[in-house]
Amino acid sequence: SNFEQTKKNFQKADIVFHCAALSSPWGKYEEFYKANVIATKNVLKAMELFNIKKIVHVSTPSIYFDFQDRFEIKEEFIPTKFVNDYAKTKYKAEQLVLNSSVFSVIIRPRAIFGEYDKVLVPRLEKVALKGFLPIIKNKKTIVDVTYVGNVVNALYLASIKDIPSKSIFNITNDEPMDIQEVFSLLMETIKIKTKFKYISYFVLFSIATILEIISKLGFIKEPFLTKYGVGVISKSQTLDISKAKNILGYKPIYTIKEGLQRYAKYRNL
């Protein structure tokens, strides 16, 4: 987000892979804007300076989320309102990339997990270590997740394939799964014993609302449960990746189970 520093660390290249972002369900708008919008502006400025003609930009399907069950979402879908500052600023970054003069490809990988993950699995572990993982009572929630190795493969394909500029692709593991099954598989793989606690959506959403208020007042740094987090475990979201399959030739290399095993091996090092 500092242009002089960005410029200093840039070099001549054929392609820029822009993966940097503040990816978090909680934080201040200014922090998200600086990390996701200003930083993207600086990357594009540095590309112009070094005459680099192509960018592959990592965005997010969080821009689709609107507290509704949605299945097989296509890349064209944009809700009337973004649910948080992360989604809002990532969409702004997309617009910067699409409106620039460089050749651009955007991927939207859903719920990335794997080695070096600091966002998704560690947060689930933190909650699980309290003794239970919350599951919405009387609700089947189907979700897509994506192992990081498959995301890297998608980035590689986006860099070498002869495709139109300004192409956007959804990326997943192509294994939609009930969220309780995902949690069970994860806890089994990383060997954390925990129970599932079935709670009503209203109760969980109310708890998250109170925790967010307490956090905003400065009593806690980050709520362990956010309204967006409750939405993620209570609302189904799967993506249509047919465009990535047909145009990029994308196909997941690793299954969810294999990805979790690789994460667990890294975690135990």
Image (tube, grey):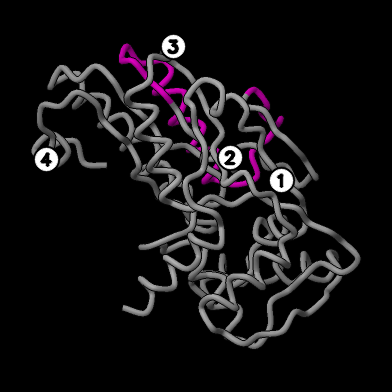
Residue 213 visible in image: no
Secondary structure category for the residue under label 4: helix
Residue 196 lies, in percent from the top left, at 75, 79
Distance (Cα) linking label 4 and label 3: 29 Å
Please state which amino acid type lies under the numbered disc 1: Gln
Residue 20 lies, in percent from the top left, at 34, 44
Q: Specify the segment rendered in magenta.
A: 76-105
Mark sitting earlier along the chain (3/1): 3
Q: Which mark is residue 61?
A: 2
Please state which amino acid type lies under the numbered disc 4: Asn
Mark sitting earlier along the chain (4/3): 4
Q: Are marks 3 and 1 in contact (CB under 8 Å)?
A: no
Q: Which residue is mark 3?
A: 164
Looking at the picture, tell me which residue is in the foreground, 233 or 206. Answer: 233
Distance (Cα) linking label 2 and label 1: 9 Å
Within the magenta stretch, is there residue 90?
yes
In this view, 120 is above or below 20: below
Residue at image location 39% in from the left, 29% down from the top: 157
Please state which amino acid type lies under the numbered disc 2: Pro
Residue 27 placement, left or right of 20: right
Name the front one of labels 3 and 1.
3
Q: Are marks 4 and 2 in contact (CB under 8 Å)?
A: no
Q: Are marks 2 and 1 in contact (CB under 8 Å)?
A: yes
